[in-house]
Image (cartoon, helix red, strand yellow):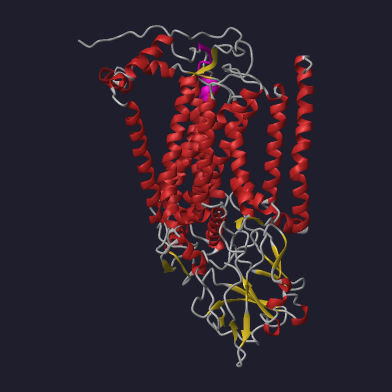
Amino acid sequence: MRRHVEPPAPPFVRIYPGSSEPPNDHPSRGGTAVVISLLTLSILAGVGFVAVYWNGANTQLLGGCLALVFLGLGCALVVWARKLMLHQEAVAPREPLPSEAEDRQAVFKDFYPGAPRIQRRKVVTWMSTAVVGVLAAAVISSLRSFYGRSPLAVQLTTPIWKRGQQLVSDTGEKVTVNSLELRSATIVFPDDKIGDVRAQAVLLRVPPDALRLPWNRRDWAPQGYVAYSRVCTHAGCPVGEFESNIGLLLCPCHQSTFDVLNGAQPTSGPAARPLPQLPLYADPEGNLRAAGDFTAPPGPGYWSIPS
Amino acid sequence: MILPRLARWMDTRLRLSKPAREVLNHVFPDHWSFMLGEIALYSFIVLVVTGAFLVMFFNNSAASVVYHGSYRAMDGVRMSAAYRSALKLSFDVPAGLLVRQMHHWASLIFLAAIVAHLSRIFFTGAYRRPREINWIIGLTLLLFALFNGYLGYSMADDLLSGMGVRIAYSITMSIPLLGPWMAYVFFGGTVPTSATVPRFYGMHIFFVPAIIATLIALHLLVIWRQYHTNYPGPGRTNRTIVGSHLWPTYTAKSIALFCFVIGLIAALGGLVQIDPIWVYGPNNAVAALSGAQPDWYLGWIEGAMRLFPGANLRIGGWLIPELFFSAVLFPALIFLGLYLYPFFERWAIYDDQDHNVLKLPYQTPVKTAFGCALFVLLLVVFFAGSDDVISIAGNYSVTNIRTILQVLFFIAPAATAVLVYAGCRFWREKREGLRVE
């Protein structure tokens, strides 16, 4: 025989006497009509969605139909809940949060049944801890798999430009002393690394007598051609905008500016370090070549970056 | 009727009547501000469902391919397979663009609802004992939600997301001592690498959502166990919970809210364009967009990066880059402060009681003033994140805007704190006729 257990009366439910809303025992006729029309809207919108989907699937119409399906359904539910359902405020007691003392003790007793039997407990504890530590070390060292072939330090400080390397444009054309108009800029790469992020440099042509480079860099700008790393020292964005009238390079990401006449020192904005300079010389044919590597590793700063 | 028969069938196998009854009669307070967390929950469900659709079409490969699709403007352009699949999803998959835009809008709403919910909890004191556990779970949820939002919009491999990846790489690099190692482990080498998109994909679609779902489940379990708080009012005491039973009114209203959340997201996803990746173009490591902005929830970090002055701090030959202060330390301190706040407050006012009745913001003037000051501070850095856009829109100089915001960073929160404190005291005297000691 099927066992049927009559659940006891709800132990903690009562209508709160101070409730502002009286119990609503009489579902309103108007409410039902509104619910039915809202559900109709919802159904029609759903049919609309399918129709739109099979006829070109216009994004706006699809989104609109889907929105109407759910807005209609949601509104119907609200009207149903507010007009047609019984309102009653309920009050329930909260059990005090900590368990009874004897329950707590019983749990501890069940949890530690074997504890007193362990011999040399300290050694066992220490060795278990050691296992966890060794395992953690194993997991952490396997993180090494997550970065490329070569060790970190090698990747960060690999030489980029070699002395004598020809400057080329992003399409691979040789850059010469006639390539740029005065007060203009272009992007250049070494001839073997076109498109390389770390190698990219901005080449500018400025009036030679306007340059204020440090004395040890005075030969690095043949005929007013000066080149800097194009990677911002703040957050690594390409410093792509040259404001020729004020001689500033502007980073589009965080608006740092660099003075191209003065060794690309930062003049405003969040960048703190100058753009590394690329020393240049012009060979007898007038081709622009690198006279060495950047003055510092290009890009954002890090802990062990050489100063 | 099928329902009673099904119920009887289940009950004879699972003995469900009593627990079912407890569930149906569980008491939930009725107040609009208690719905904010529900909005977050429902937008998360929308995220999972729309995400399950998107994942079928997205290709997580950085391999270089040439585009030949129905978007003629980009025919023959070289791009990553990931970006091509996102374009294909937007132009060639029926309803693909709708679902993609719904997914993106849902993420914005998810984060907005979490932040609004967090503010409600903070300003009404719902984090106090015994609810510190859920405060901590909730903040951790926010962290993972921020992280997953970032991963999501960085995966499409368009030019804007490429910029975001480069900036995140630079931020990671800036961490003292560990930074370069962390950046290499996370991004797979010097950005750009072909490892980034597959990694972001793995984390975005599986690892982080699994953590978020687990945390949401824990969050709800704890709420169920502890009940909600109540706003102060007649009959609301520390020993009782006043509200509606879960069934039927509350359930109907909650499902209605679910419908509204889906409806809103569908309307936005269909009618309001978001993240038009075909306008940005494919990721190009030597190019950048001007006027680039992150999604709104990262605006405060972006703004801090722009506002913090260039400081070249070297300690014994080691560099601490400026990004570390603005993009690592500043957010870390904000979150640390939030994590510790309930414990700090308990210590500061010698309070070790359980609190099941909320306080209205004006009843706790010091905390409300502090919270509003923090909000204004975040608002200032948020606007700093758009200084270039403001500059172009209003034809102001970026330098001037930055200087003004740098000053406001200190003055505006202080002024807000004073004003809000005075306002709370005035309101409290007026409402309660009490003098605040």
Total number of numbered discs in the rendering: 0
Tell me the residue at 75%/81% (across/down): A207
Using the image as rendered, state which of residue A119 and residue A212 is in the foreground. Answer: A119
Find residue B13 and report its image quarter.
top left
**Image height check: is B166 above or below A136?**
below
Q: Is residue A245 magenta?
A: no
Q: Is residue A88 magenta?
A: yes
Q: Position of residue A251 (x, y in %)?
A: 66, 64
Q: Residue furthest bottom?
A: A284
**Image height check: is B67 above or below B368?**
below
Segment colored magenta: A80-93
Using the image as rendered, state which of residue B166 and residue B59 is in the foreground. Answer: B166
Using the image as rendered, state which of residue B409 and residue A102 is in the foreground. Answer: A102
Q: Position of residue B324 (x, y in %)?
A: 61, 51
Q: Position of residue A193 (x, y in %)?
A: 50, 76
Any part of residue A263 in sight: yes
Quadrant the N terminus of chain B occupies: top left
Q: Residue furthest left?
A: A1
Quadrant the C terminus of chain B occupies: top right
Find residue B287 and report its image quarter.
bottom right
Q: Is residue A213 left or right of residue A193?
A: right
Using the image as rendered, state which of residue A85 and residue B192 is in the foreground. Answer: B192
**Image height check: is A87 above or below B201?**
above
Tell me the residue at 48%/12% (across/down): A95
Q: Is residue A216 left or right of residue B204?
A: right
Q: Position of residue B336 (x, y in %)?
A: 59, 37
Any part of residue B102 in sight: no
